[in-house]
Structures are given as C-alpha cells and as structure tokens.
C-alpha cells in the first residue's frame, strides 16, 4: 500500500521514532491550535486542549486505520475533545460572548471610513475584521466555518466529523455566511 | 423580477448549482444590480474566509507534549547521589539506634586505628567523627524538645521554629528552581 507523508510518519512513530511524531505535531499544530483557540476563545485553554489532543493521538495511534486519511481521523478526535470541553464548561464559554471584543469596536478603533465599506480597509484588515465577526457567531455555525476554512475540509468530511447530515452542514454554513454578511452590512462594511 | 435568495447566491459562488440553475443565476445577475452586489459580497466573504487568520501556537507547546509523553529519566549522577544519601542515612540511623559508638567492635576498631596511619585508619576516624556529630545533634534535638514540648507555649515555639526553618530551606533551594521552571515554561 502506498503511504502518504502523514502515514509514513505514523509508521515511523509506531516503530519507536519520537522525532517522527514531533514532525507530525509540527505539521498540524498551527491548524489544530488555530481551530481550538477560535472554538474556546481562550489561549491557555487552547494550549492545554491542543496538548491533550496530541497526547490522545499518540496513545491511540496504534488504532489508526491506514486505509483512511490521517487528517480526517485526527480532526474528528480534536473536534470531539473540544466539544466535550465546551459542554463541560458551557457557562464559561457562554459568558465569553458578552466579553468578547465586537467587530464594531475594531472598526471604531481603526479609524476607517465606514461609508466606503471594504474598500477602506487593506486586505489584512478586512481579513482580521471578518475573522473577528466569525469569533462572535453562535458555536453551531462557528464550528462548521472553522472546520470548512481552517481545516480546509469538504462538506462530506465535516459531516463525518460532526456526525451531522451533509444537508445540515451545508445549510448551516450557508446560514453562517448570511449572518456574517448581515453583520458586515450592520457595520457599514458593505455598501 | 424576484431577487435570488442568499442560499442560491452562495451555492452559485461555490459552484454547487446544477447547470440549468447556474445559467438562470447568470441571467438574473446580468439584469439585477442588487443581486450582483450581494453575490460580490459573498464572493469577497469566501475569499477572505479561505485565508484564515491563524493564531500562532506558543513555542512551548510541542516541547511540553514531548516531555509529558517521554519524561526525562533521572541522570546517572542523581541516581548515584540518591543511593549514597540513602546509604548514609541508613548507616547513621543503625549507628545511632544500636549506639555503636560505645560498642566493643567500634571501640576495638578505634583502639586499633588510634596512633596508626593509612587510608583505612583515616576512613574509620572520619566515619566515627561524622557519626559522633550526628549522634550529638540528635541528642541535642531530643533535649531541646524535652524542654519545650511539655508546655503549650513550647510546642507553639517549636512549631513556629520548624515552620520558619522549612520556609527558609524552601526559599533557599526551591524558589530559584521554581523560578527557573516558570521561565522555561514561558
């Protein structure tokens, strides 16, 4: 069987090569941490969860089935870990909704010409703005946007990870985009 | 002419419409400025979302995972030091418990080595000196406790003194290590 890069690293790790596992972690740490931190919206918790994720991956690596993509398997474990944490600490996560910095604050502080909408912002500022709005949308929409765009997954893969029907995944992502557009209109970002 | 729904516009941008629906959307966009603006907004949104702002994980993240997965084994020197310390403690305890300083064997050894030289005599004299010192310290501590402990005030003074001693030792030996560990983490 032809092994891809991830699978070769897993084979080496299972053979006792620690460096191979470190390489595998380096490959995924940014996307995993990026996903987790936007889900829990707390950097320290995100570090702990990302570390727990890698340790969990290491302990169940011998159960990995080489017929499937490693990334999808890993993202499912990561998603379940984060969702379990959020369910256990629901009140804490909800309270963040009130405390988080609003996208309007960003606009107010950035001294931009709101009448001109996106044209007034640089590409980077636009990106920062949109992703700040993403941070504020409800979790059931946010998690799908993060899986789609941070983890770069297809609708079918997201459905597999979240155990939702593909139709529901699509609808929620559409709905999330509608919410984002509405927020942008409210903020005068779109003319 | 009825405007297109957001859902249709998003699906059009993603290319998931059937060819007939896609053609209908294209025709509508040619005629409707509002829908063109909305479609452009979704296109912009898609392009921005496709370039996510990723937070950089702290550098300590992976080293800490490796440390948790493969804890460092104690070094050979620390194992040797631990064994030596345990041996000294055990021998001291046996020496004091059985009062070997006055035993005939030790007395005989001391007499044998008194006035002699050589490495064996030196070792025996050294050990005797250390053990006598330890015994003297133990006796002094017992005497001190006998003075203080019968009264509540004495107990309190002894407790405070022990706490202060413990705090002093912790401050001297543990604090710099904790500081170093904390600095290493951050």
Image: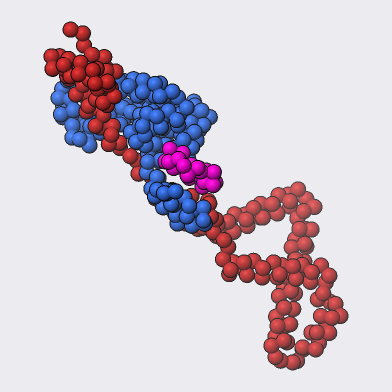
Chain colours: A blue, B red
Q: Main secondary structure of the magenta part?
A: helix
| The quadrant where residue A113 appears | top left
A188 left or right, relative to B80: left
In this view, the residue farthest toward the front is A1
- Name the residue rendered at 44%, 54% in the picture: A20
In this view, A28 is above or below A103: below
In this view, the residue farthest toward the right is B104
Q: Position of residue B115 (x, y in %)?
A: 75, 92
Query: In this rendering, does residue A153 appear at all?
Result: yes
Residue range highlighted in magenta = A53-73
Q: Position of residue A166 (x, y in %)?
A: 40, 24
- Name the residue rendered at 18%, 32% in the picture: A121
In this view, the residue farthest toward the top is B1
Give the camera-side residue of A135 and A111: A135
Q: Position of residue A94 (x, y in %)?
A: 44, 25
In this view, B61 is above or below A159: below
């Amino acid at each position: 069987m032809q092994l891809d890069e991830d699978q070769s690293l897993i084979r080496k790790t299972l053979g006792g090569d620690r460096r191979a596992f470190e390489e595998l972690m380096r490959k995924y740490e940014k996307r995993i941490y990026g996903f987790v931190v936007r889900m829990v919206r707390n950097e320290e918790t995100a570090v702990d969860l990302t570390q727990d994720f890698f340790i969990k991956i290491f302990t169940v690596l011998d159960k990995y089935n080489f017929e499937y993509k490693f990334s999808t398997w890993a993202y499912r474990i990561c998603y379940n870990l984060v969702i379990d944490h959020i369910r256990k600490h629901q009140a804490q996560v909800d309270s963040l909704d009130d405390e988080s910095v609003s996208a309007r604050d960003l606009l107010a502080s950035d001294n931009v010409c709101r009448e001109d909408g996106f044209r007034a912002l640089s590409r980077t500022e636009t990106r920062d703005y949109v992703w700040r709005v993403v941070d504020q949308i409800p979790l059931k929409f946010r998690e799908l946007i993060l899986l789609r765009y941070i983890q770069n997954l297809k609708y079918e893969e997201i459905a597999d990870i979240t155990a939702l029907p593909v139709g529901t995944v699509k609808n929620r992502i559409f709905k999330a985009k509608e919410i984002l557009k509405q927020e942008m209109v409210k903020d005068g970002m779109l003319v | 002419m009825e405007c297109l729904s957001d859902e249709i516009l998003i699906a059009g941008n993603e290319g998931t419409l059937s060819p007939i629906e896609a053609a209908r959307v294209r025709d509508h966009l040619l005629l409707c400025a509002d829908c063109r603006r909305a479609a452009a907004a979704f296109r912009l949104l898609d392009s921005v979302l496709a370039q996510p702002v990723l937070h950089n994980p702290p550098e300590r993240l992976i080293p800490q995972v490796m440390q948790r997965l493969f804890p460092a084994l104690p070094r050979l020197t620390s194992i040797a030091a631990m064994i030596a310390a345990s041996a000294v403690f055990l021998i001291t305890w046996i020496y004091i418990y059985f009062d070997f300083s006055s035993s005939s064997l030790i007395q005989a050894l001391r007499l044998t080595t008194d006035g002699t030289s050589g490495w064996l005599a030196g070792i025996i004299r050294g050990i005797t000196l250390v053990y006598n010192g330890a015994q003297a310290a133990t006796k002094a501590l017992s005497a001190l406790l006998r003075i203080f402990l019968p009264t509540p005030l004495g107990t309190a003074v002894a407790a405070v003194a022990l706490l202060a001693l413990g705090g002093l030792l912790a401050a001297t030996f543990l604090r710099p290590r904790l500081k170093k560990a904390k600095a290493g983490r951050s």
